[in-house]
Amino acid sequence: MMDSVIPPGLFLIICAPILALASQSALRRPLMLIIPLMALGLVWMVPDGPVITASFMGFELIPLRGDALSRLFGTIFTLMGFAGGLFAFKQKSTTELVAALFYMGSAVGVVMAGDLITMFIFWEMMAIGSTLVIRSANTPGAIKASMRYLKIHLLGGVILMAGLAGYLGEGNPVLFEAMSLNSVSTWLILIGFLVNVGAPPFSAWLPDAYPEASFSGSVFLSAFTTKTAVYVLIRGFPGEEVLIYFGLYMVFYGIIYALLENDMRRILAYSIINQVGFMVTGIGIGTQMALNGAASHAFAHIIYKALLLMSAGAVFYRTGKRKCTDLGGLFQSMPVTAICGTIGALAISSFPFTSGFVSKSMIAQAAADQHMAYVWYFLEAASAGVFLHAGIKFPWFVFFQKDSGMRPPDPPVSMQSAMILLATLCIVIGLFPEQLYALLPYQVDYVPYTVTHVVNMLQLLLMAGLAFFVMLPMMKRTLTISLDFDWFYRRLFPALFDLLGRIIYPIYGRVIDLFKNRLDRLISLVERYNGVDGILARTVSTNSAGALGLIVLALCLGIFYQMQ
Amino acid sequence: MNTQDKHWLVRPSTIRLLWRLLIGILVILTLMDLVIEHHPHFGLDGTFGFFSWYGFLTCVAMVIFAKGLGFFLKRKDTYYDG
């Protein structure tokens, strides 16, 4: 078995330096397309069950394992890598692409790992890869944001590692399978996972860092970290009720902050947390229907979110602007971008005949099946809210609203084709969901297209649309950001340290003054005997040293003899 | 700028038409509640035009809530730059 299968994650990671070597040659562009496609092929060559096993410090590791869930995530990660590679044709920084391959490879490594230790190693590599993708935008903002991003993810990694060490120390199997929240260590593991999923209070890292990446960097970033975290939650904590509350909080957090936001890429970043919130809620519900919903929604989400960030990236590429207050009216000169962006916006809103409709509704259906009334009501309200904050707000303020007067052309063909590819996928999955359903971990017993469901969804969404335009005067864009939990570590804690310093320093000074005289005397005393001419610093002959040693030894002997 | 110079999609006449179209579709969609099958799970969701009024009201509530929160949380976007 072992010799016929190449681990797709490792393959991508090994290809990263190869791409770096080709940075100046004409090969870079084709390589960036072929490598993810080859990895996609490798994902599909991994058979079910443990494929590679190895012994490490007494643990039986399974660095490569295949099953439906792993294959689903491996497929969408590599597919996304291909589309992202196409979109990044004009990216001048090869560093970003090398980092993106490394990042993609470690994400694929996580979802195809059969044991916790392998998972953790790839998990940490992912943090490094993604930090480099952000940093390679090479603006002062990006460099600072990447360091804040790295610190949060290293913190999450430390918590996860502590949890794993405890978990394995308690004698649990190293196999990566469902765990129950019955010990401190499993809670730590869960917290480690939740940091990456963007759960409160660690949500701010995402809208802080992703929008600082380059036009193509944020496309790669949107795909891997949070969705890998969704994968590990599906695998490790299906049906944990606490996830429902985290998920619902994230869903509304994303909507409210996106409504307040002015930067188009930050709007999309908040809506990642909103969408991942739906998945986390589904994992918390935990039935087969809900887990299928969470997994398929992750699949559909990666496509339409990448599409949305591509359309935002195209606007950024052409205009260099990100703020809604500076944008508007771009549909006139960027029709392809506007249409593709709108298709992505419809798909994220679960509009009928798009990919979001066939995936997200399984989660709400699962809540209804389980008679979770409040969860269901919240999810439906949130569905309307998605249309509000992403479905309409994003295309409206970027491509329509007031005319900014800018007439930038559509982006280069490579970027357009990447957008058209993903827009097509959004619609094809929406029209023919069977293909996606066949990839899901459980048998799908769900019919998305009934007259009732389509009509109800249209009622909900179009009324949300009406609400948007009725409330438009209240949503006038302002040059503002909204404070979030990152305020604590970006403002409060540094300010407290500063304050502490100001209080402590005078006290420290007084204490020093108090002891200064005595200290001076002590120092001169020491200097007298041990200084340059001090009696203890003089050189002595070997003979006297030997004699001195002999005396000391004799003394020791005498003391020990007395003690017997 | 003359109305005719504007892109057809942003002319006031088109916008009026779009508004009428939206209202028309909404009325028809809501009235369709009379003919389609219902699968209420809880109670409130069985009321007439549930998805219509629920969608509208929750969105209005979210916008107002966001606006209210904005009073406390909004800062100039150069806040962290200093």
Image (spheres, coloured by chain):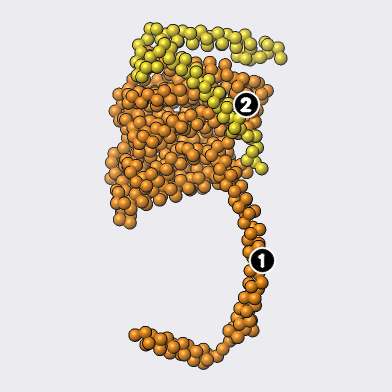
Chain colours: A orange, B yellow
Q: Residue at x 46, y 17 (%)?
A: B54
Residue placed under numbered mark 1 in the picture? A513
Residue placed under numbered mark 2 in the picture? A477
Same chain? Circles 1 and 2:
yes
Of helix, strand and loop, which one carries label 1?
Answer: helix
Q: Give how far across and how far down residue A282 sits, in percent.
A: 38, 30
- First along the sequence among labels 1 and 2: 2
**Residue A537's image quarter?**
bottom right
Relative to A173, does residue B65 appear above or below in the rendering?
A: above
Of helix, strand and loop, which one carries label 2?
Answer: loop
Relative to A285, does residue A485 appear above or below in the rendering?
A: below
Q: Is residue A333 visible?
A: no
Output the chain of dot 1: A
User: Depth check: B74 or A547 in front?
Assistant: B74
Q: Residue furthest front?
A: A514
Q: Residue at x 59, y 32 (%)?
A: B72
User: Depth check: A525 or A462 in front?
Assistant: A525
Q: Which mark is residue A486?
A: none
